[in-house]
Amino acid sequence: MNRTDLRRVDFHLLIVFETLMHERSVTRSAEKLFLGQPAISAALSRLRTLFDDPLFVRTGRHMEPTARAEEIFKHLAPALDSISTALSTTSDFDPATSDAVFRIGMSDDVEFALLPALLRQLRLEAPGVVLIIRRANYLLMPELLNAGEISVGVSYVANLPANAKCKPLRRSWPRVLRADDAPDPLTLEAYCTRPHALVSFAGDLDGYVDNTLNAMDRRRHVVLAVPQFNGLGALLADTDIIATVPDYTVEGLTASGRVYANALPFTGPSFDLSMAWRGAQDNDPAERWLRARIEAFIGDTQSLKQID
């Protein structure tokens, strides 16, 4: 097909095809594109005619792409990214008048501790914009970015899509939360002996400090795992349970005055909190404005200069 032949192509169909490749379901594709299922089915029929291939074969509740569909998608995805970038760079963005919808992925700790300050600033600068916050840890972030369900995310990140971009925002060291306000930090023995709570999206009973403890031939005893940071301070209050948390969550967790923070009794592992975004929207004026605000209100450049 040459470029003149492109006049015959409805680019709306290509968006439907891309969504079907991600969702593998007519129903979910219709929901994501805010269309009815008959519209998606009709678009798929036209796509099959356009490419002279079934494209998707139903297997149980899912639709599996054919080899031809996989080959088309390999070339189509970067092409659509390039078109999106070309169109984005021609538009202006005025935060004061914009009604843009931003889809942001955040891990629970970031949403709890760092989103409030960012939100207050965005409301001042851009009262008409809409934020959709998706829960996104390092396991969920790659697929959410790849599928276009978020344009930017803030979390500890790993194994990002090849076309994603990433920038460290701050470095975090763990702190210990405890309900008793004894002036002295816990000893290593007391730390390992006391019962522990942790925040775990997946319900795990170990966290990022356990590898360090294991290397010291030490263990801790976790008696409580909760899915989010909100409410953790209240749960620890009036108990002997302690929790090890990222340093940037301490202010929010101790605000009630019922729990206190100390340093770890050993050199704990640090990690970088990073911002990742879709390469296709790297030059989008609205997205660049959003990323600048995220960096300003979530980032901590001084912490990145510190040595573990």
Image (cartoon, rainbow, N blue to C red):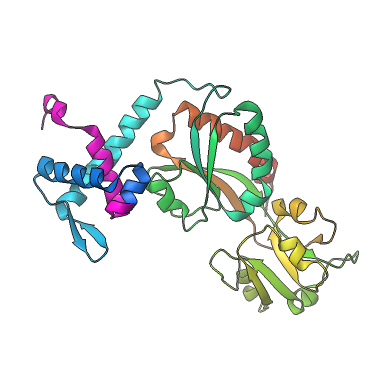
Residue at the right extreme?
183
Please state the horizontal and vertical placement of residue 30, each as a whole percent of the image. Answer: 32, 47
Q: Which quadrant, please, contains the C terminus? A: bottom right
Q: Quadrant of the N terminus?
A: top left
Nearest the eye: 165 or 19? 19
Look at the image and give the residue range highlighted in magenta.
Answer: 1-27
* Residue drawn at the location 15% of the way across and 45% of the way down: 45
Identify the residue at horizontal 86%, vertical 68% (top origin): 180
Magenta residues: mostly which secondary structure?
A: helix
Is 92 located above or below residue 148 in the figure?
above
Q: Is residue 5 visible?
A: yes
Residue 253 drawn in magenta = no
- Which one is nearer the viewer's eye here, 212 or 257? 257
Question: Is 40 or 261 nearer to us in this picture?
Answer: 40
Q: Is residue 154 left or right of residue 306?
A: left
8 within the magenta span: yes
